[in-house]
Image (cartoon, coloured by chain):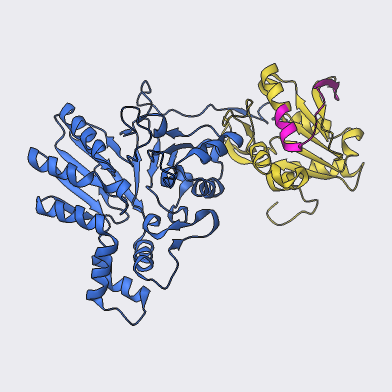
């Protein structure tokens, strides 16, 4: 599985937190993890990336939604079996929009989004958000879904992802 | 309010001192939640001597076990001798619910009088405390949900829950546990009186003695939660599972269980929380716990805000 982290200072923070993130990935995947390398994304941005040697054909992205939106337009990302977006969905339907764009390249791809909470923006609008906070003893700021993933790690990585993140359905349902 | 949870004494980690948690918010009243040892009673007395303006003492007996009650009668004796305190004692008063309990047992063999005798025998420590309080002319208050205790409030268990416990306790036909799996507790512990208090930093704490997690409600509404039964692992796991986001909570353990082989205690839980990367719980095993921590004022001490992963992306 491929693990992509934004290089933004508020997410990657420092080398200690990146080291803790890598240890976390090792614990949740249960296998060896490659060192972090910098990779190029779209619109001339760089990201940190590492691989866990678990044979799972998926990509996890921890980044601001704009970065996730852009990364999910890449053929290399869409051709995975699934993408885990550890980010905000911001507004209803944005998750489906991203999934539809990915499905136009790979109709079989699945998308999981981090669990969201309702936040109030400075201009008084509610939006769906995921917040990375420094709680627990992880050594880096985690989202609620990341913490759940860790606590479900004994179930196996794929099952833990399904329990800790929300699958985006391609079907539009009442209430979406 | 401020909280001071008492610990062991003189480095003695072998003796089972049991629980004793003090809550106070001004110079006039003190809430004592359990008093499991004469040493704790002496510490409460010293606290009252030091805070000489306190005139009202509220004592909550969470449940019948001696590690929660052993020091209460001695403390009542001392309070009586001082004759300067208004004292109220809060506990379950099972005899007031004989009819409901009789309905729940429904074995056709008991009548009200025999059930009363069984209840008094089963809840013997509470009986002693109530009798001592009444002998001294102190007020005895039934610890029903919604009852105010100074500036704290009893929030559980419900009448239905504690009469269930009483029925099971005296009914030899049924097993002696409440709840299932992680949430299983002995009947004696299950219906511990639960107390909610608002601390000076605006955080709300739930004290729950040895209560069954099954009887703990609205857990997400508290900032700080006592992990029941001196930090028993199964109970704590049930609470973690119940919470929406347990990492956002602060956990507190009153573990003065000593070194006896059957004493229980929090060691397994401490290791579990470390393995699962929870922040360590505040634990009396390491010494007296004071909340809010000294140095924190009356302003809310909130967790760091964190990074919202959409803040820079309003165009989407």
Q: Which residue is located at x 29 percent, y 78 percent? A: B110
Q: Residue furthest front?
A: B261
User: How many numbered badges does the structure rendering display?
Assistant: 0
Of residues B245 and B39, the one nearer the viewer is: B39
Task: Confirm whether the magenta stretch covers residue A30.
Answer: yes
Q: Position of residue B132 (x, y in %)?
A: 15, 52
Does residue B170 sit above or below A119 in this rendering? below
Q: Which chain is yellow?
A: A
Q: Is residue B157 visible?
A: no
Q: Which residues are magenta?
A: A23-43
Q: Residue furthest bottom?
A: B108
Question: Which picture quadrant has residue B252?
Answer: top left
Q: Position of residue B316 (x, y in %)?
A: 73, 33
Q: Which chain is blue?
A: B
Image quadrant for the N terminus of chain B? top left
Q: Is residue B181 visible?
A: yes
Q: Which residue is located at x 71 percent, y 22 percent? A: A18
Q: Is residue B76 left or right of residue B273?
A: left
Q: Position of residue A1 (x, y in %)?
A: 83, 36
Q: Is residue B274 left or right of residue A149?
A: left
Question: Which picture quadrant has residue B150?
Answer: top left
Does residue B189 sit above or below A41 in this rendering? below
Q: Is residue B153 left or right of residue A150?
A: left
Task: Confirm whether the magenta stretch covers residue A18.
Answer: no
Of residues A83 and B52, the one nearer the viewer is: B52
């Amino acid at each position: 599985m491929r693990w992509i982290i934004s290089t933004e200072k508020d997410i990657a923070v420092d080398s200690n937190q990146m080291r803790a993130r890598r240890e976390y990935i090792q614990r949740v995947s249960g296998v060896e993890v490659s060192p972090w390398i910098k990779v190029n994304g779209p619109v001339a941005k760089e990201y940190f990336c590492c691989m866990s040697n678990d044979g799972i054909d998926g990509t996890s992205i921890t980044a601001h939604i704009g970065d996730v939106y852009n990364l999910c337009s890449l053929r290399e990302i869409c051709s995975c079996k699934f993408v885990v977006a550890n980010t905000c969905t911001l507004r209803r339907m944005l998750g489906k929009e991203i999934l539809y764009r990915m499905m136009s390249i790979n109709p079989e791809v699945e998308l999981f989004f981090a669990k969201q909470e309702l936040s109030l923006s400075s201009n008084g609008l509610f939006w769906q958000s995921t917040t990375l906070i420094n709680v627990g003893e992880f050594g880096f700021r985690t989202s609620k879904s990341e913490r759940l993933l860790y606590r479900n790690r004994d179930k196996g990585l794929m099952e833990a992802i399904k329990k800790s993140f929300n699958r985006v359905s391609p079907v539009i349902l009442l209430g979406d | 309010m401020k909280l001071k949870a008492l610990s062991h004494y003189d480095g003695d980690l072998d003796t089972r001192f049991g629980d004793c948690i003090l809550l106070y918010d001004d110079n006039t009243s003190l809430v004592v939640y359990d008093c499991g040892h004469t040493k704790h009673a002496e510490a409460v007395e010293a606290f009252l001597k030091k805070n000489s303006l306190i005139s009202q003492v509220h004592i909550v007996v969470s449940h019948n076990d001696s590690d929660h009650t052993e020091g209460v009668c001695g403390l009542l004796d001392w309070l009586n001798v001082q004759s300067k305190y208004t004292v109220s004692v809060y506990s379950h008063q099972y005899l007031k619910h004989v009819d409901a309990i009789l309905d729940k047992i429904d074995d056709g063999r008991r009548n009200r009088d025999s059930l009363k005798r069984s209840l008094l025998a089963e809840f013997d420590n509470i009986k002693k405390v109530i009798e001592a309080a009444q002998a001294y002319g102190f007020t005895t208050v039934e610890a029903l949900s919604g009852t105010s205790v100074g500036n704290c409030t009893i929030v559980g268990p419900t009448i239905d829950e504690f009469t269930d416990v009483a029925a099971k306790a005296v009914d030899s036909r049924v097993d002696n546990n409440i709840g299932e799996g992680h949430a299983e507790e002995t009947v004696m512990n299950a219906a511990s009186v639960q107390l909610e208090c608002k601390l000076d930093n605006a955080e709300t704490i739930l004290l729950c003695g040895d209560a069954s997690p099954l009887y703990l409600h609205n857990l997400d509404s508290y900032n700080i939660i006592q992990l029941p039964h001196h930090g028993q692992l199964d109970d704590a796991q049930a609470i973690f599972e119940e919470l929406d986001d347990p990492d956002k909570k602060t956990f507190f353990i009153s573990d003065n269980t000593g070194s006896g082989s059957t004493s229980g205690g929090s060691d397994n839980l401490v290791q579990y929380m470390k393995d699962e990367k929870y922040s360590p719980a505040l634990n009396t095993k390491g010494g007296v716990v004071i909340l809010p921590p000294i140095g924190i004022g009356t302003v809310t001490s909130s967790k760091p805000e964190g990074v919202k992963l959409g803040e820079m992306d309003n165009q989407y």
